[in-house]
Image (tube, grey):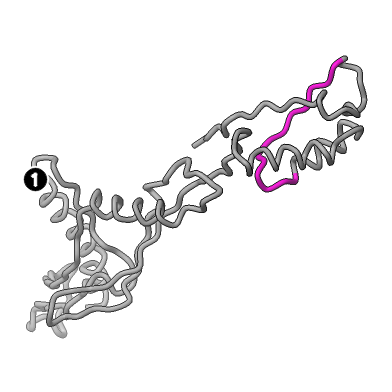
Amino acid sequence: EERIVQELNKAAVPALKEEVLIASDSTMGQTTYTLLEGEGAIKFGEPELIIPNDIAGETMTEFQITGSLTVSGIYYDQDAMIEILKNELLLKNSPEKELLRINEDSTSYRIFDRDEAAGKIKVTANIKGIEQYKIDPESEEGARLLEKIREHILGADIDTASRYIQNLPEINIVEIESWPAWAPTIPNLPENIEFELKEAVMVN
């Protein structure tokens, strides 16, 4: 009995996923449904087992037990859900930053309320995005940041200046090129320091 119950439970979720795939196929590619998984998302009924009642006391190499299990789950329109999460992420985006990329594969859900009578559930959903600071030299904030950097690195040696800039939260990677190439320090005149801003390169 324990063995067949284990097998029934093991087969239940793949069977549900197969049903969800069939539902997706029925939309002719217009909708992609996804099975909601996680704690409390899938309901398992009591297994019904059929065990021969005439095998007690018998010696045999094998015998057959059959069983069935009712299992239910919830599936949703994946694209619609991701679109909702994307919009929420954009609304919560920091004003001084810009959203570079949304990782659609990072979505996760947790059921926190279930109304069986109404056939409704409430979930918390999460999705991850990558954002970067907006450094526009033409904007007040961008100009102020560059001026702050310029003031701190005037006359500093290359390594010290590089470490200072690298430690700023707005900066991903810093490269300093001096002229002449052998010059060990940053110029002492602010007008001799130029900045070149580059977009962050996203790597999967």
Q: Which residues are magenta?
A: 167-179
What residue sits 9% from the left and 77% below the top?
Answer: 50
Quadrant of the snapshot with the N terminus: bottom left
What residue sits 29% from the left and 50% below the top?
Answer: 83
Residue 19 image-quadrant placement: bottom left
Look at mark 1 in the image and give the residue it sits on: 27
Percent coordinates x, y for residue 123 in the rendering: 30, 69
Q: Main secondary structure of the magenta part?
A: loop
What secondary structure is found at the residue carrying circle 1? loop
Percent coordinates x, y for residue 157 in the rendering: 91, 32
Residue 150 counted in the magenta span: no
- Answer left or right for 197 relative to 153: left
- Answer left or right for 134 relative to 114: right
- Answer left or right for 97 relative to 81: right
Amino acid type, callout 1: Thr
Which of 98/3 is in front? 98
Label 1 Cα neighbours within 10 Å, binned few <14 / some 14-19 / many ≥20:
few
Which of 136/33 is in front? 136
Percent coordinates x, y for residue 5 in the rendering: 23, 74
